[in-house]
Amino acid sequence: MTVQIGDIYNYNEQEYVCIKRNADVFNPRDYGFQPSWVCSSCWRGYWCEYEIKNDRIQLQTLYIHDADEHYPMINGVSISPVEYMPALTQTDEGLIPTEIPLYFGHETYEHVDLILPYTGKLLLGIPFSKYSYFFHPSECKKLLCFEFDNGELKGIEDCSETAHILHKVYKRFRLREFADDEELYEKLPEGFRGPLWWFKKDTTRS
């Protein structure tokens, strides 16, 4: 399984990722695109960089491959010129230097500054490592829950303490060091306790 490229959320000059899966904050189909995969690291055919500022969430950068090679303007912005990076190509004569497009062949829209009418919650975290198949609250050193109503930021809940507790819980689980007491378990919010039944004091596992 290839690691999938995830969306990036910039907030207070820090980069966050969306926990568990990418949220549909921006849907390119609403703007005339037909996203299509061009590499195995991005099956959905696009990824985004967002910015949360001035109590709004906006699209800053879009990387996309369109099935019909149709790239309309977004908020008055056209696709950027293709950038290339050095590479090596295998031939019958051996390896020869060449160039390949950046961003795996996806076209790029930069400085879009498109304010989005998103409604819902986003659980965003700063992971200990960006090189992971998926992101989980237990793997985040900082975890924030943002709530939006029609694009307007209504509140932010700091869930970092819960993330730290979960990190300890799953570390014990991986090491099979089950708790002798319920101290960490009792500190967790109610919604997190059910899936962690094995961590309770009376757990019996071999």
Image (cartoon, grey):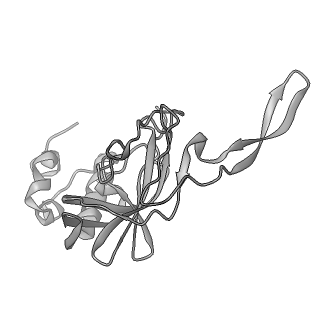
> Residue 168: x and y, percent?
29, 60
Residue 168 visible from this viewpoint: no
The one of 134 and 162 positioned closer to us in this rendering: 134
> What residue sits 19% from the left and 66% below the top?
147
Vertical placement of 200 versus 98: above or below? below
Q: Left or right of 13: which side holds 204? A: left
> What residue sits 42% from the left and 66% below the top?
113
The one of 44 and 92 positioned closer to us in this rendering: 44
**What is the quadrant of residue 87 in the picture?**
top right
> What residue sits 24% from the left and 59% below the top?
118
- Quadrant showing the C terminus: top left
Residue 33 visible from this viewpoint: yes
> What residue sits 10% from the left and 55% below the top?
191
Vertical placement of 38 versus 178: above or below? above
> Residue 144: x and y, percent?
27, 67
**Residue lying farthest right?**
93
> Residue 146: x and y, percent?
23, 66
> Residue 79: x and y, percent?
55, 52
Vertical placement of 88 versus 50: above or below? above
Vertical placement of 90 versus 42: above or below? above
